[in-house]
Image (cartoon, rainbow, N blue to C red):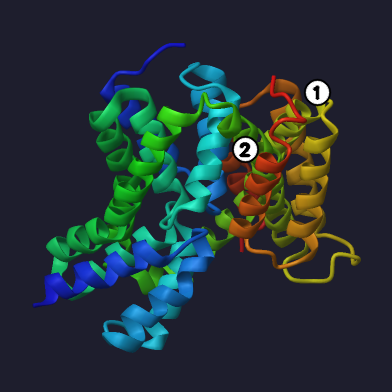
C-alpha cells in the first residue's frame, strides 16, 4: 500500500501548490510529516536544506527523497510521477487554449498586459536572491559582504557586456568564492 | 523560427534543469537565453506568455514551463521529452544524495561553493530582467510602464501573491482591450 499512498500524497502536492517553490513547502510538510509520518521534523529540515543546495524544483526533490527512503527507486519514480501529473494535465490544457486563442484580439490584449507583470516577478525573484547573497539576512542598509558584492558586480558586467555563458558564470562565482574562503 | 528535434529538446532541458539553483525563475531565464537568443526556437513574447501561464497553474514552475514549451515546439512527444529532461536531473541528484545526505548538507566546501553561486545566480536573473525590461520600455506604452512599475513595487514591498498580480493584469488587459491596440 505504500506506492499508492506515495502517489496520491504527491498528487495532492502537485495539484494544490500554486506559485511554485516555497509556496509548496507547507503542503509538502503537511503530507509527509503530519499525515503520513514518512519523515521526522528533523529529516524534513534536512530535506529543505538539500532542496536548497541542489538544482530542480523543491517538490520534485522532495518526491525523490521521500520516495527513495520509503520504497526505494520505485518509490521515487511513483512519487515524482504523482507530483508532475496534475501539472502535465492542467498545463497541457492551458497550452492548447494558448495555441488556439492567442490570436484573438482580447487574448492578445490580456497577454500583453501579463508580460510586464512577469518581468516584474522575475525582477523580484532576482532582487530577493541578490539581497540574500549580499546581506545574508542582515538589514539592507548595512554594508554588504564585499566579496559577494564584487562577485555579483563582476558577473553582472560580464553577462551584460560580453554575453558570457550564464551557467559558466554561476559556476565560476561558486568556485572563486570557494577558493578565496578555503578553511 | 527553427524547430528542435526531440533529442535536442530533451538534452537542452536536461542541461538547463541540472543547473537551476535558486528556484523556478532561474529555469525561465536560462530557457530565454538558450531557446530565444541562441536557438531561435521561441520569441521573447512567447517565452513571457509561457512564464505567465506556468506561474498561474499549480505545480513546479519549471515543470509547467517544460510542458508548455514542449507542446509548443513538438506536440505531445515534445512535451514528454521536455518534462523528462526537466525532472531527470533533480531525480538523479537527489537519489544519490539521499544515500549520504547528512554528510552532504554538513560539507563546508559545498556550502561555500553554493554561497558564491548565489551572487552569480542573482547576476544571471537580473541580467535577463534588464533585457526584458528594455523590451517593455521600448514599447513606450504608458499602460505597460504602469503595470511594470506597479507590480514591481508590489512584489518588492508587499507579500502579494503572484497569482493575484497576474489575475489583476489579465483584468487590466480585458478592460483596456479596445483602447490599447497591440503591436
Report the residue at 27% width, 34% height from top.
Answer: B81
**Quadrant occupied by the C terminus of chain A:** bottom right
Determine if marks 1 and 2 fall on one subunit.
Answer: no
Which quadrant of the structure image shows residue B153? bottom right
* Numbered tag placed on residue A110 in the rendering: 2
Report the residue that reaches farthest toward the left: A1
Identified at 47% across, 43% down, the residue is B19
Residue at the disc numbered 1: B138
- Taking the image as shown, residue B134 lies to the left or right of residue A73, namely right
Residue A120: tell me if it is visible: yes
Q: Are marks 1 and 2 in contact (CB under 8 Å)?
A: no
Q: At 62% from the left edge and 50% from the top edge, which residue is drawn? A: B166
Name the residue nearer the viewer: A133 or B48.
Answer: B48
- The chain holding disc 2 is A
For the residue carrying disc 2, how many other residues have a C-alpha within 10 Å: few (<14), some (14-19), or many (20+)? many
B141 vs A46, nearest the viewer: B141
The answer to whether any part of residue A168 appears in the image is no
In the depicted structure, whether residue A99 falls above or below residue A77: above
Task: Report the front residue among A110 and B144.
Answer: A110
Q: Nearer the viewer, mark 1 or mark 2?
A: 2
Q: Quadrant of residue B146?
A: top right
Q: Secondary structure at mark 1?
A: helix
Q: Residue furthest top?
A: B1
Q: Is residue B26 left or right of residue A44?
A: right
The disc at residue B113 is: none
Residue B126 located left or right of residue A143 = left
Q: Is residue B84 above or below residue B155?
A: above
Amino acid at each position: 500500500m505504500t506506492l499508492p499512498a506515495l502517489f496520491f500524497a504527491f498528487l495532492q502536492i502537485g495539484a494544490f501548490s500554486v506559485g511554485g517553490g516555497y509556496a509548496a513547502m507547507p503542503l509538502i510538510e503537511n503530507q509527509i510529516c503530519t499525515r503520513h509520518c514518512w519523515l521526522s521534523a528533523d529529516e524534513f529540515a534536512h530535506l529543505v536544506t538539500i532542496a536548497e543546495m541542489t538544482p530542480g524544483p523543491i517538490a520534485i526533490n522532495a518526491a525523490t527523497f521521500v520516495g527513495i527512503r520509503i520504497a526505494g527507486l520505485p518509490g521515487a519514480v511513483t512519487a515524482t510521477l504523482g507530483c508532475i501529473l496534475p501539472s502535465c494535465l492542467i498545463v497541457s490544457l492551458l497550452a492548447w487554449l494558448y495555441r488556439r486563442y492567442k490570436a484573438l484580439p482580447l487574448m492578445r490584449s490580456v497577454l500583453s498586459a501579463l508580460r510586464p507583470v512577469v518581468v516584474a516577478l522575475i525582477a523580484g525573484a532576482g532582487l530577493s536572491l541578490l539581497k540574500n547573497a549580499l546581506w545574508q539576512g542582515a538589514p539592507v542598509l548595512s554594508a554588504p559582504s564585499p566579496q559577494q558584492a564584487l562577485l555579483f558586480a563582476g558577473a553582472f558586467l560580464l553577462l551584460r557586456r560580453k554575453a558570457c555563458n550564464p551557467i559558466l558564470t554561476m559556476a565560476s562565482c561558486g568556485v572563486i568564492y570557494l577558493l578565496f574562503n578555503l578553511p | 523560427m527553427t524547430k528542435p528535434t526531440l533529442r535536442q529538446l530533451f538534452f537542452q532541458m536536461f542541461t538547463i534543469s541540472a543547473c537551476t539553483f535558486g528556484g523556478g525563475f532561474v529555469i525561465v531565464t536560462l530557457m530565454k537565453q538558450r531557446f530565444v537568443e541562441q536557438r531561435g526556437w521561441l520569441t521573447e513574447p512567447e517565452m513571457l506568455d509561457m512564464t505567465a501561464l506556468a506561474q498561474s497553474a499549480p505545480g513546479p514552475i519549471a515543470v509547467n514551463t517544460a510542458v508548455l514549451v514542449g507542446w509548443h515546439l513538438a506536440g505531445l512527444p515534445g512535451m514528454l521529452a521536455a518534462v523528462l529532461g526537466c525532472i531527470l536531473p533533480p531525480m538523479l541528484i537527489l537519489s544519490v544524495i539521499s544515500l549520504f545526505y547528512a554528510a552532504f548538507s554538513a560539507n563546508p566546501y559545498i556550502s561555500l561553493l553554493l554561497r558564491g553561486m548565489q551572487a552569480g545566480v542573482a547576476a544571471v536573473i537580473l541580467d535577463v530582467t534588464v533585457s526584458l525590461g528594455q523590451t517593455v520600455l521600448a514599447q513606450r506604452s504608458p499602460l505597460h510602464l504602469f503595470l511594470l512599475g506597479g507590480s514591481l513595487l508590489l512584489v518588492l514591498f508587499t507579500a502579494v501573491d503572484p497569482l493575484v498580480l497576474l489575475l489583476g493584469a489579465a483584468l487590466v488587459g480585458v478592460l483596456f482591450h479596445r483602447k490599447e491596440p497591440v503591436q
